[in-house]
Image (cartoon, helix red, strand yellow):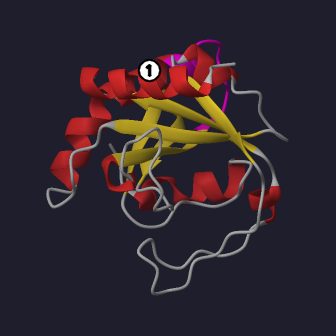
Amino acid sequence: LCDLADVRSTLQHHHYLRRCRTGRQLNYLVSIDGVVDGVITFAYPMMSADVAGIPSDELVEFARLYLARNVPHTASCAIGQALRRVKPDWAQRFPDAKPVHLVVSWSDTEHHKGTVYKAANFRWLHRTKGQPHGNSATSKRGARAQHGDYRHDKDCWVYPLDKATDKVVAEYVALRGER
């Protein structure tokens, strides 16, 4: 675990979105043989809708992944390690938050094919249509600026953090039909 201050510059200068997440978040350094190679960020989702029947306040968003060298298998290995830690780490860092049951993420279809999510055993749920976003300062999720990438279609990926949630997601996927 590390603080946002430790990774802000890396995300702003090297991640393709060129920005950090705001609000509650956990940042993990990714190390290869003791050398820091990147960062993974999980954040409180910037939405109020449930995902696959799980309320938004019981979700955490896999928000950023940046690897400097992108050594084969590093991403899926690092994601797997972070996924094993995120639930207890979130509860410890944010004791007033509801327990986290599901990790949700979106891959921008103009930049990604979801390969890393497949390798890390995420499940594809659906594709969302790109549209402008922007919350007011009084929104439950706080103010959010307009960014051009919000207009891109996104694939929604999920990773259940417990067996009960896995069952709920499986039922949801079965009803919708998995691709």
Question: What residue appears at the point 28 percent right and 43 percent down from the top-left corner?
Answer: 100
Residue 63 is at least partly visible in this image: yes
Locate the C terminus by quadrant. Answer: top right
State yes or no: residue 69 in magenta.
Answer: yes
State yes or no: residue 163 in magenta.
Answer: no
Question: In the image, residue 98 lies at what x, y percent?
Answer: 21, 53
Few, some or many residues within 10 Å of mark 1 (<14, 14–19, 20+): some
Instruction: Indicate the secondary structure of the residue bearing disc 1.
Output: helix
Q: Is residue 129 above or below residue 85?
A: below
User: In the displayed structure, does residue 112 sit left or right of residue 32?
Assistant: right
Residue 34 is at least partly visible in this image: no
In the foreground, 30 or 99: 99
User: In the displayed structure, does residue 53 sit left or right of residue 120?
Assistant: left
In the foreground, 38 or 159: 159
Q: Which residue is mark 1?
A: 170
Question: What residue appears at the point 81 percent right and 52 percent down from the top-left corner?
Answer: 152
User: In the displayed structure, does residue 41 sit left or right of residue 95?
Assistant: right
Question: What residue appears at the point 42 percent right and 37 percent down from the top-left corner?
Answer: 103
Q: Image quarter for residue 23?
A: bottom left
Magenta residues (range): 66-76
Q: Is residue 156 above or below residue 179?
A: below
Indicate the amino acid at tag 1: Ala
**Furthest residue in direction front, as rendered:** 175
Question: In the image, residue 9 lies at what x, y percent?
Answer: 59, 59
Question: In the image, residue 95 lies at what x, y percent?
Answer: 14, 56
Question: In the image, residue 158 lies at what x, y percent?
Answer: 50, 32
In the foreground, 154 or 11: 154
Q: Is residue 157 above or below residue 43?
A: above
Number of disc labels: 1
Q: Image quarter for residue 6?
A: bottom left
Locate the N terminus by quadrant. Answer: top left
